[in-house]
Amino acid sequence: MIRFDEVSVTRGERRVLAEVSCVLPERRIAILGPNGSGKSTFVRLINGLVVPSAGRLDVDGLDPAADPKAVRRRVGFVFQNPDNQIVFPIVEEDIAFGLRNLGRSRMEAAEASRAALDGFGLGHLAAQPVATLSGGEKQLVALLGVLVMQPAILVFDEPTTLLDLRNRNRIAAAIGGLDQQAIVVTHDLDLVAGFDRALVLDGGRIVADDEPGAAIAWYRERMA
Amino acid sequence: MSREAWSPSLRAAVSSWPAGLKLAALVVLATGLLLIQSAAVLGVASALVLLAGLLVLGPAGLSRAAGRWLVLTIGCLALLTLLIEGPERALVVLLRLSSLLVLAELVTGTTRASAIQDAIVAALRPFERLPFVSADKAGLALALALRSLALVRGMAEELREAQAARGLRASPSRLIIPLVARILREATETAEAIDARSWTGEKARSSPKEPPRDHP
Ligand SMILES: Nc1ncnc2c1ncn2[C@@H]1O[C@H](COP(=O)(O)OP(=O)(O)OP(=O)(O)O)[C@@H](O)[C@H]1O
Ligand SMILES: [Mg+2]
């Protein structure tokens, strides 16, 4: 379970996040809010990419600030731009990268990445250069590269922003089918319809926290 | 890619050679090219390298490797040498740099980045007892450097087009600042993504895998 305890993040003079407290036990949680409201900062805290200036976080009993390595084994993170998170030039070697980081041998990692690609219906892409994939395929590969590491929690920062409708739907379906807890930052309000809970951030504070229908209605009205 | 090669079977054969062997050959041949001072000998060596490049990579593969900016840079260096040191030295510079370029593409174009990474890690592992040597870091750094070459080439092209679309004529001085800014920004994100995927920069210990947590 993820717990924020009066967490603040300060950048220079600016308070990017101001004494945020919340507990996040639900399986599907959306983070909404206008540009610059602190959404990315909020989710980056969860795997220790950002460290609190004050306050404390607890992720399944671990403190991301104190032990980011252990936390990152539990928390997978999918970024907005797949170009920057796919490290290797060939699809299957990128999927294998995360597995090797978990200590698998080269053979085990290669086999597991093949199996994962097949399982996702992407087997035909295994040997393809990443540079030649479409945006949607890239984002699926990025997601799969994180999924094969079997994190207990998945965090997405605007996973569908760069995608067309068809690819957006593929990613939405992939997120919907996850067994794990998923925390999704998005401006795509349709994506969060079936979620369990939505937080709305504004100016570094949680300004609404409800089931998605109510939170979205509140957000729409507020932003109009 | 293979259909662009003049000899796909040759390309496949070279691709199947061990990465370590190819890297070692690259080091030896590149050193050789740097040591040869005679324009005539260098001419013969360069012709052989170019021939190998054409056979294995094909003209399309070669021209992709070259790229406009790289060719321009080599051209400028040769021109400078011509002005300062005369035509023979200029020819030497031209031949040497272009055959180094082809040699490098011969290796990187036929070898997976992960295989190069593994070869570097294996080669450096014995030296890890020395201070400041980390085989894993060096391996990933090199694999990333190779990946970045292709990315930077693509970025430069995109920026050039974006500027052209705004009616600006392309010039290196206009390109360099946005290019560097973008490289740094994207490098930061890539570094975060690598962290997020549990890369620790040390030989990963086999750790028991934790099953996904159940949710009600
Ligand atoms: N390193 C930094 N230095 C200074 N300011 C920063 C830094 N990182 C973030 N900020 C500021 O913090 C605020 C929140 O940023 P954050 O990226 O969390 O917003 P966001 O809600 O994800 O926005 P978007 O919807 O545009 O992605 C922004 O105003 C941003 O300018
Ligand atoms: Mg953001």
Image (cartoon, coloured by chain):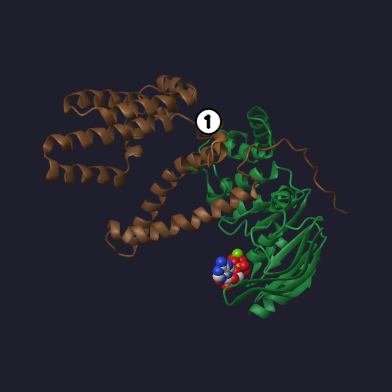
Whether A189 is drawn above or below A72: the answer is: below
Point out residue B109 in the picture as x, y percentages from the top left corner: 42, 32
Q: Would residue B87 appear left or right of B69 to someone viewing this image?
A: left
Quadrant of the rendering where the N terminus of chain A is positioned? bottom right
Foreground residue among B119 and A153: B119
- A62 vs A147, left or right, is right
Task: Point out the residue furthest to the right here.
Answer: B216
- Identified at 58% across, 59% down, the residue is A161
Q: Which chain is brown?
A: B
Q: Secondary structure at mark 1?
A: helix
The type of residue carrying mark 1 is Ala
Q: Please tell me which residue is depicted at 50% across the width and 55% down the height of the picture.
A: B186
Dot 1 corresponds to which residue?
Answer: B115
Q: Give the total number of marks visible in the rendering.
A: 1
The chain identifier of the residue carrying mark 1 reads: B
Q: Quadrant of ligand 1?
A: bottom right
Residue sitting at x 34%, y 58%: B176
Residue A167 vs residue A127, the one in the foreground: A127
User: Is residue B109 in view?
Assistant: no
Residue B42 sits in which quadrant? top left
Return the residue nearer the eye: B110 or B38: B38
Horizontal side of residue A197 vs B171, given as left or right: right
Looking at the image, residue A214 lies above or below residue B18: below
Q: In the image, A204: left or right of B26?
A: right
Label 1: how many Cα within 10 Å (few below 14, some 14–19, many 20+): some
Whether residue A209 is situated above or below residue A122 in the rendered picture: below
Residue at horizontal 80 percent and vertical 45 percent from the top: B212
Image colour for chain A is green
Q: Position of residue A212 (x, y in %)?
A: 76, 67
Residue B37 can be seen in this image = yes
Task: Give how far across and how far down residue A189 sits, in percent.
Answer: 68, 65
